[in-house]
Amino acid sequence: SYDEAKTEKSFYHVQVNKNGKPKLERIQLETPRKFVILEQTYTGLTPSKITAEVAQLVEENDEPEAIIVPVIKGVLPAEATRGEIDLAKIRNAGNKSLLVHPVLRLRETEISEDIIRSIFGSDMKDITTKAFEYFFEIFSESYNRTESEKIARLAVDLISPLKEKRELKVKEKLEEFL
């Protein structure tokens, strides 16, 4: 891992004389490659801003034959995802270096139920009703009223187990439907 790049590497060469007494010699290893670890926290910044700042940081620390490891830490704003970070742009920012290996330690922010309630101005039951109406409208374009209603109900029923990552419950509901 990138943490080990800062740790000095060595080994012991042990010689034992005729009397059985050991002689220890510590031999320090020098790595043929230089590691440049760039740890920064980017809490609250948008993915595009993070990409730009990390790419700039890599350009500033670009060295020949070095391995650059930008460690990107922090918490992303709501509705931003780690997938929006342009890793290719960050990797290409190092022209002289041997390799740029970005490490993402970003957490995604989930929108709390309180915020959802404040947006919709009602309780979760109303959100479920709105979701059903939305799904019903979409499925009505391709299916008759009865089928659309069944599929919309299934879609709403799958939201909770999908959110909680209960794979078995999702499979059960899908098998019941089919």
Image (cartoon, rainbow, N blue to C red):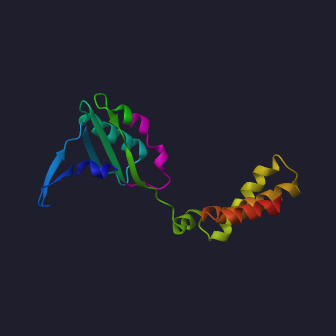
Q: How many marks?
A: 0
Query: In the image, what residue occupies the spot 54% across and 66% down?
Result: 118
Q: Residue 139, how many percent across, how many down?
A: 79, 51
Q: Horizontal placement of 9 versus 158: left or right?
A: left
Q: Is residue 74 above or below residue 126?
A: above
Q: Residue furthest top?
A: 95
Return the x and y of residue 69 as percentages of the image width and height.
32, 43
- Extreme-front residue of the structure: 18
Q: Is residue 173 left or right of residue 118?
A: right
Horizontal side of 142 relative to 118 (left or right) equals right
Decide if residue 7 is in sight here: yes
Magenta residues? 74-90
Residue visible at 30% across and 39% down? Answer: 68
Q: Quadrant of the C terminus?
A: bottom right
The residue at 82%/60% (across/down) is 177
In-front residue for pair 24/71: 24
In the foreground, 158 or 128: 158
The one nearer the camera, 79 or 15, is 15
Q: Which x, y percent locates residue 117?
A: 57, 67
**From what the image shows, is residue 110 above or below residue 29?**
below
Residue 134, position in %: x, y? 72, 55
Is residue 76 a member of the stretch shown in magenta? Answer: yes
Quadrant housing residue 19: bottom left
Task: Name the one closer to the observer, 122 or 35.
Answer: 35
Visible in this render: residue 129?
no
Q: Quadrant of residue 93?
A: top left
Side of 50 where 62 appears, left or right = left
